[in-house]
Image (cartoon, rainbow, N blue to C red):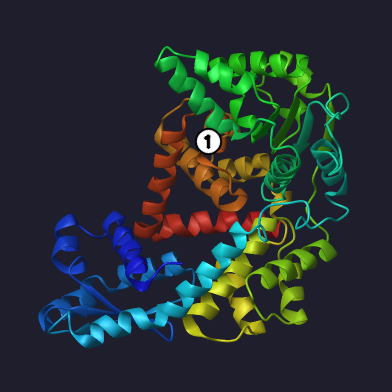
Amino acid sequence: MQSFFEVFENVKKYCLANESVSEIGYNKWIAPLVPVKFENKTAYLAAQSDFSRQTIMDFYYDVIKKGFEETLGFEVNVEIVLQEDKRNDFYEDAATTQFNQVVENEKKLERAMQNGKYKLTFDNFIKGKSNELAYAFCYAVAGKEDDDSINNAEIFNPLFIYGDSGLGKTHLLKAIEHKVRKNHPELNIIYVTGEEFTNEIVKAILDKNTAPFQEKYRSCDFLLMDDVQFIAGKESTQEEFFHTFNALYNNGKQIVLTSDISPSKMQKLDDRIKSRFVRGVQADIQPPDFETRLAIIKRKAELLNINMSDSVAKLIAEKIKNNIRNLEGVVNKIKALTMFTSEPVSYSMVQKIIRENAVNSHPADITVDRIMNDVASAFNVTPEEIRSPNRCAPISLARKVFIYVIREMKGLSYAQIGEELNRNHATITLNYQDVKKMLLKNSDFKETVEDIIKNLKES
């Protein structure tokens, strides 16, 4: 858990990156501020003089306040006080005392995680109708506790789990890893994401030394790859993955893969790799039903020692329907808010958190094509033009807005969005940041983007 000092360091980074703050202004007025204390949702900062205090209040208050709210995830007041001696007893005591209990609680949580209580295991995976088949297949792949060997590779090889982001695919991969390591410590297990696999092969090629890479992956007993869709369209990565897959498969080694989409929908994936993906067993994970969502919320609240009433838990389960990460994110913010303010968990508090996060009740229903069509319509261009290399102003702007909206509404990574538009990670990142800056400067543009998001949510 961050101390108030660390929180303020993040706030300063936010201010420095903000377009409204010049480097000179940051160094002159914001950097010298001293964090004093955090109390009753108010951050107290000390300025070196009355003139500094007034200047900060006049020109930098809003960006500092926004920085705290972005860092902490809830509304924060900011008080700029005058401090003649920043090393006095008041500063030393007040800025640290409030966080002592918070830090100690976090240490307890960390120790509990290290002891296995909060590891991503089959025991703490919440099962429901939406994921029971994927769970059963993964459990079978991991083997039974009393097995001398694991012999399910012939049936479940490869095992391919797919579903929207945030539904528990990574949890299942980690559960397999945890169980196999516990029961068969002699086995060589590799967990890797598609992006990490790609980065490793690119580095190996640049270094002109692919032998260690090949030895690493082709000698493992279990290959668990998350977000395998990331390799689609990447020629060298697909080539290396193809040979790695064949080597493992032919030697009877287990391969488990996850993806946001089924193999048949990976348009840029080599056909020879697709044919191998469908050779084994596939299972999809759907958004959890109400009972499963409620169980997830209660388990998360229990793990974080949150005293949550049934009515509050039901409110969250009713409002957030399609993403487990969103469910857990709201519970995490409840924990943060109660720790920083000492307020009890209330119905109104949770309603506000849900509103502030603008969590839509049906995000999974909003497809990439729907977002593309709505953005194209708003800017009087076509979806084909947004996907094209055309850089004329209207098309370029529509493309940037599409990137922003799809990231905000679907939570896709920059790399995943890049796959949609056939552009690299860096370009997508810059375009997303461009829109964020434009939203701060142009109220008409902001209204247009907000209308697009609102229409998508309500339609």
Check the image and report above or below for 177 versus 445: above
Taking depth in this image into account, of 26 and 32 the one nearest to the observer is: 32
Residue density around tag 1, few if under 14, some if 14–19, many if 20 or more, within 10 Å: some
**Position of residue 28 measured from the top left corner of the image (x, y, whole percent):** 13, 65
Q: Which residue appears at 69% of the width and 72% of the height?
A: 302
User: Which residue is painted at 56% across and 28% down in the image?
Assistant: 197
> Which corner quadrant of the image does residue 280 belong to?
top right
Q: Position of residue 228 (x, y in %)?
A: 65, 31
Judged from the image, the secondary structure of the residue bearing numbered disc 1 is helix
- Give percent across and percent down for residue 452: 57, 53
Residue at 19% from the left image edge and 57% from the top image edge? 22
Nearer to me, 187 or 173: 187
Residue at (26, 59) in percent of width and height:
20
Can I make out residue 43 in this image? no
- Going by the image, does 130 lie left or right of 85? right
In front here: 175 or 453?
A: 175
Give the residue number, with chain letter if any, for mark 1: 415
- Looking at the rendered structure, the number of numbered marks drawn on it comes to 1
Note whether 412 is above or below 306 in the view shown.
Answer: above
